[in-house]
Image (spheres, helix red, strand yellow):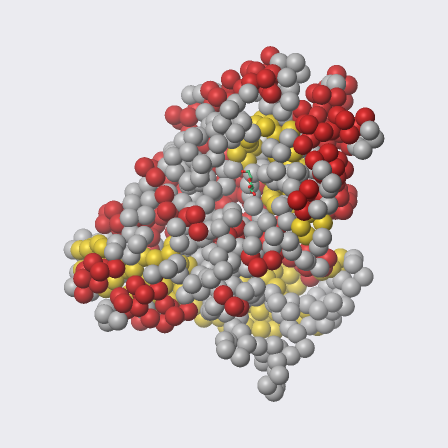
Amino acid sequence: MTESKINDLLSKMNLDAKIGQLNQYFSRGHFDPEIIRQGKAGSVINAAGALTGTGESKSSTAEVCNDIQKLALEGTHKIPQFFGRDVIHGYRTIFPIPLAQAASFNPELAKQAASVAALEATATGIKWTFAPMIDIARDARWGRIAEGNGEDPFLGAQMAAAVVKGFQGDDYSASDKLIACAKHFVGYGAAEGGRDYDAGEISEPTLRDIYMPPYEAAVKSGVGTLMSAFLDLNGIPASANRRLLTDVLRGEWGFDGFVVSDWDSVRELVHHGVAEDEADAAAIALHAGVDMDMVSETYLSTLSASLQSGKVSQNDIDEAVRRILRIKLRAGLFDQPFTDPDRVTRDLLRPNSRTLARQFARETMVLLKNEANLLPLDSSFERIAVVGPLIHARSELFGSWSPDGRATDVTPLDEALKQIAPAGMKLVFADHADKAVHVAQSADAVVLVVGEYPYRSGENSNVSDLSLPPGQAALVETVATLGKPVILVVIAGRPLAITKQVAQVQSVLYMWQPGIEGGAALGEILFGLESPSARLPVTFPRATGQVPIYYNQKNSGRPIRAEGPFKSRYVDLANAPMYPFGYGLTYTTFEYANLKVSSETLRGKLEISAEVTNSGKRAGNELVQLYVRDLVGSLTRPVRELKGFERVILKSGETRRVTFTLTEEALAFTRADGTKGIEPGNFQVWVAPNSRSGLQASFIL
Ligand code: BGC
């Protein structure tokens, strides 16, 4: 049905109409209605105005989108527009940043949050979001680590599939669903030195086994569109890579949606040095498989002449148009091109959306240290000093990419804590260092809130030093020397190297950028209404010099545990991270025992189980993790790989056996001959609370 409709449309379109569909228009502050009327755009990005960053930027409105849609439908070619925007971790109800979402290890919550974002964004006319960002990141210097799911392909794939489903549902023609865009295909997180936009080198097996699984999962869950990355991967800029965009994505994985370039990245092929000029750039990108040109207008300005000169083929143009029309048809735009303007009052910031945002925020905060069970703070503490530069945080709780969030929707952190503190506990506040010392001196305990402002992570916000921002380490030191119990709360868009600060304080709670309900969620955890349950989705280095650092590393010929002095190590620093992937504490303790493997040999599948006991005094929520190691391969294999995780909620003293099923398929990898499959041999397996501990057994494949 869809395909015959596409053929019908294509047969009626002249060349200009076709090329127009391949162009995504950005008004740069001077909207030109003729572009739409004459069919020179297939999509409009940021319809209501230029993106101005966090805070009070101009949001899109149904009226603006409807007006533009009318122009399109009255115009020469009558093909509906669709309106794109970066709806990354919420639209108006801002959820935790994606990296924090991954720390929940709860794909279902991520799906629900994406579904709220879709409801809100579509109420303002947007039909297409440039999310999820599913780039694996092994280097915390890279600012965009905040936007993804961390370092692990298994977790990354689960989160990617869930978020795509949340945005799109089963049928994105529904008026409250958005078309998702998995980005940035592929390897973007490997930019050298953590410098955004820079080049990266990734071997084919690593590309396939580490960077690609989230994309394959997104394609399997029906993602409508993909975005090509900015990066130059192994010498080929992503928007010029036909092998990846066409052979792998469409050929191997069967993706039938369309690919949009990243912002201006078609034209940038000239800067990369693979294209002579804009015409060359457009021809290369189109042939590679980039169907829509995001804002560079090189398709619009050059493709017609390039067709005449034989530089591009009619078939390449037609195929790109076909894919774009396919998604427009699937999105129901021809039947339902307009948005009901009344939805804005009904669908934005619904009370249950805020409730979800609070729950999600709670489930993303990672307890890293809790000496002598200082947390939760109960009413035996009469006076708590809450100090630090971020104690009044409002939009600072949003993190990067929250252009439609509003500071006025947020209860400031200090206010939220006051509202939640138990009766009889007095909170005193100070945001400046000198006052902080003063109020801390007279308190029973200190909550010290430090970390990053939103613009310090995200796109184009890389750092060369993972320490706390300037001045904050000194503040921690000063407060710590007062001798009061100190709880360090870190707001951040990346893992920071806080080795020294961890040693100086009694408790550390890593809250990332938790979104609109972050203050209340923090209060609920600090004061014990809820327990922390999140785990690190990324390795925390001791110092910047350890990066890139990740748990699923290779063993090397001289691993750190080897005999003798000559081994893979630093002379000035331990190899072990500050905190490993998968790490996180709760308000109770858990013990693991009686590991069982259902058979010595895996044939088809195997069951691995262990008893988990809540050995502490409070109820708690434990994330039980399954890891494997393939001991010998035709290519070297990671020292551990996550293959499963499951949450158990146990009362004090309660024991439960947690069982994982491991399939042959889960052990497949890219082998020396380039094919994907399993290799027989010996394996180790762990049921573990994090990637560096646990109970271990073996099996044979
Ligand atoms: C970013 C993309 C984003 C696009 C549109 C680019 O600079 O890399 O992630 O979707 O802008 O705003």
Q: Residue at x 64, y 69 (%)?
A: 554
Q: Position of residue 235 (x, y in %)?
A: 71, 53
Q: Residue at x 55, y 57 (%)?
A: 194
- Which residue extends farthest top? 74
> What's the residue at 68%, 52% (across, down)?
233
Query: Where 403 falls versus 379 (above or below)?
Result: above
The residue most toward the front is: 276
Left/right placement of residue 112 relative to residue 228 reads left
Image quarter where the C terminus lies is: bottom right
Q: Quadrant of residue 652?
A: bottom left
Residue 33 is situated, as x and y percent measured from the top left of the image, at 56, 18
Q: Which residue lies furthest to the bottom in this view?
A: 564
- In this view of the protein, which residue sits in the foreground, 218 or 597? 218
From the image, which quarter does the N terminus lie in?
A: top right
> Residue, x 68% and y 67% (percent of image)?
637
Residue 480 or 200: which is nearer the viewer?
200
Which quarter holds ligand 1? Answer: top right
Q: Position of residue 41 (x, y in %)?
A: 62, 24
- Relative to 32, is 108 above or below? below
Residue found at the very far right of the displayed protein:
310
The answer to whether any part of residue 155 appears in the image is no
The quarter of the picture where residue 447 lies is bottom left
Rendered image quadrant of residue 278: top right
Residue 530, x across and y down, in percent = 34, 54
